[in-house]
Image (cartoon, coloured by chain):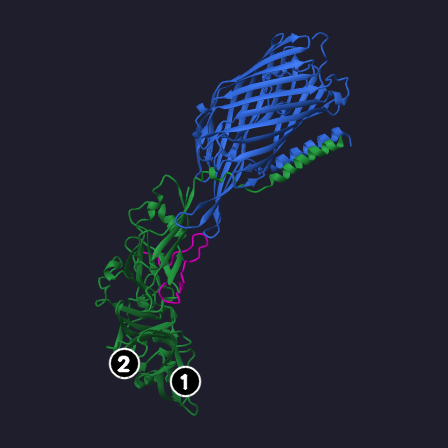
Amino acid sequence: MHKFTLFIGLFFYVVLSACSEGPLSIGKELVYSPSDVIVTDTFSISTYTVKVDSIQTSGYEKALVGNYTDGYFGNITAKSFFEIAPPAPLTIPRYSAFDSIVLISHFTNYWYGDSTKPFTMEVHELTQKLEDLKNTSGYICNTKEATYSSVILGQATISHTFPDFHIRLSDSWGQRLFQLIDQGDSIITNSVKFGNTYKGLALIPSVGTNSSIIRFAAADTSCYVRLYYKNEKNGHVDFKINNGNLQFNSIKTDLSNSPLKSLKYLTDRVASEKTGGLSFAQTGTGIMTRMEFPTIRRLTDTDKKIRIISASLILSPVEGIISLPSSLNFYNTDYNNNFNIKSPLSNSSTGAVITSTPYIDPMHTQSSYSVDITSFIADEITTISSIPPALLVSVPLENSTTLERLILASPKQAVNPTRLRITYWRY
Amino acid sequence: MKLQYQIIILFFALSTCSGVLGQTTTSSPYSMYGIGDLRQSGFSQNRAMGGSGIALSTNSSLNPINPASLSGIDSLFFLLESGMEGRLSTFKDGSQTQHPGRLNFSYLAFGFRGTKWWGTSMGITPYSTVGNNIITKKTIEGTTDFLTIIQHGEGGFNQFYWANSFRLLKGLSVGINFSYLFGTIKQTEESSNSRYFSGSLTQETNTDLRNMMLNYGIQYSVNISKDIKGTIGGIYGNKYNFTLNQQDVLRDESVDKNLTFPTFWGVGIALNLYQRLTLTSDYKCSYWSKSNSSSAYSYAKNTLFTDSKDFSVGLEYSASPSIYSNLIQRSRIRLGAYYSTPYIMIGGDKLRDAGITAGLGLPVSPKLRINLSYQYGQKGTINSGTGVITEKYQAMTFGITFSDIWFFKPKYD
């Protein structure tokens, strides 16, 4: 009889072991699957070029100076402004005599334009306090310019290929400073008085230069006015950059000979159809590409529900003319190109700012930027609005101390077009 | 160890296993249709006799098929029965063969005869079970890649019943059965392809049922001769319009759907010869075609309902059923066969389910009997074609019956 119990036990043991078998593929023809995963990249994309103002250029410790004309981006003039201050305490040994005064800085391996043509840079004295140019957010924008004296304090021919520069400044200007120091004048000892008397310096390209815009260091440790004096031992004192957050660059764009000439206000836009299918972006000057996705909300025109799994925007840059920016930023925008400069598009779950680095095609025909805009698309398809969802594509404005350019190919081009690929779940 | 303890320990071990595995047992792709596989009614004894029992009147076991049978219980006994069912299947679809198994709780019931004219029983038993776990694939639209899809169904509806039997005249009993149907069918679909997204996209639908229904039975026995007793029986249930509440977990939506539980009737005949041999035969029909199949939730294609028909025959033999005989003589041998057409159709085709059964009823001790049934059957569509699934299965029901002397036997019965 004990064998009998064993027999029952054995049967159920076999059943139990068969229970653990995984999913069956038998029956798969009978299954009705109510949901689908769909990948599509046939959404239409409209691209425009816009120009935003109020790009912060202050406080980045870099000076941009020069002038260059580009067929697409127009004529750009960059000038740099900063305050200087005497060291405190400042003493010069007795019986010293003035020798000379120079402006010293070094280049930072960035230039825009024709690097083979040196140009003349002039130093002028400011006639306006930089403090007055700050906006309500406490920074100074690319479109601002401080007034300065027409007197040239000094000038030099420079090129980014020189490692650093010493520009000899006016001796009479230097003598005056030396006397004030020597007399222990309150202009030197009182920083408010000094700031009212010496408002700062402007570095500008000479009129008529069209070669390049170069960048050099403008931190208090790297850019200074050095006054040399003579004694038994020669010596010097350094007037360093004061108030680093007021050091800024004026970047003025003249688009009158560019296809973008109709861009005057923030709300203006130039459709890429009018610029050969191309659209543009440039940091420093505030030129950005506006991308509209007029058809993506049609995804929800179904009885079923939609969940966006992923959305990639693939941008196709024009190559060969310029080198590709190493990174791109994106901003949510409205119909009038308003955007919040402080909040670039970010991943809604991690909070990380979404940036895109380029895939460089070795043949330089199919390079691209691919960017994950899943949360943007997921938000936009559920938004009820007659205005198509839009993004601004920008070369990063943070530390906008370059004039890096991006030219995007038409979304309608046959090979490697700019496109939006959405993977979604319909259930 | 004494056999009776071995049996009890084994039984409870299996109960525990079925409870643990109850959520994950793979079983049958057929069960994704409608409200799942409708479970054969009847306990282990009925199962061993081909599932028959409409005209079966037993004195020492419970027959849930016909509530009128309860007034045949020996007035000495309080009966407690429980059973487990294990099933091993071989599914074929022309190109492949797979062997899932399942283990289920089958029934738990007790019953007794309260008076000379009233017998009663209460119990719980599955009404339908869903257990499917099917893997398939589907093109990701716009690509040449595939999604892996696993559709999983589990759960089912249970019934709690209370059956009462009344002896109206000598040989004539009627019965009424109150059933409370309750339970949830949970169906999920998981889609995955790690190249496109991590994890899986999961849809889940839960279908709840909570409803009450009544059905009826009648049995009439007559002594044809001194050693031959004949019984005829009938069962009947009216249709009920039940409300299924379906919750789409992902959409966070809930809808009520109507599902008609159909009118059914069944007739049976039994002959008892020399108190040793019992022959039974049943025929039962349920009008599922009148029920709206689309109202039942399903991830399956082309669900259609058809009238289900069940035909069964069985026999039981015992050398000497008297309690004074030895164990071997008191043992019962049971045989049976069945042929049925279930209520679901696949791709417009009716199904056929047929098999043979055998079983043993063994008195292990004065208070404990075990009832084993073994079943071998085949299920598949009637019209064979490509892609048709056939199932060959072996099922064993392992039932135990406790009987205790609860009442004194009246002097005059």
Say which of marks 1 and 2 sits in front.
2
Q: Which residue is mark 1?
A: A236
Q: Is residue B171 visible?
A: yes
A224 shown above or below B351: below
Rendering coords of residue A137 (x, y %): 35, 61
Q: Would you say A251 lies left or right of B126 here?
A: left
B21 shown above or below B117: below
Q: Chain of mark 2?
A: A
**In the figure, what tint was chain B given?**
blue
**Amino acid marked by disc 2:** Ile
Rendering coords of residue A294 (x, y %): 30, 50
User: Is circle 1 on the same chain as circle 2?
Assistant: yes
Q: Residue at x 46, y 51 (%)?
A: B197
Q: Secondary structure at mark 1?
A: strand
Please say whether residue B339 is one of the residues in the magenta stretch: no
Which quadrant would residue B54 be assigned to in this image?
top right
Rendering coords of residue B147 (x, y %): 46, 47
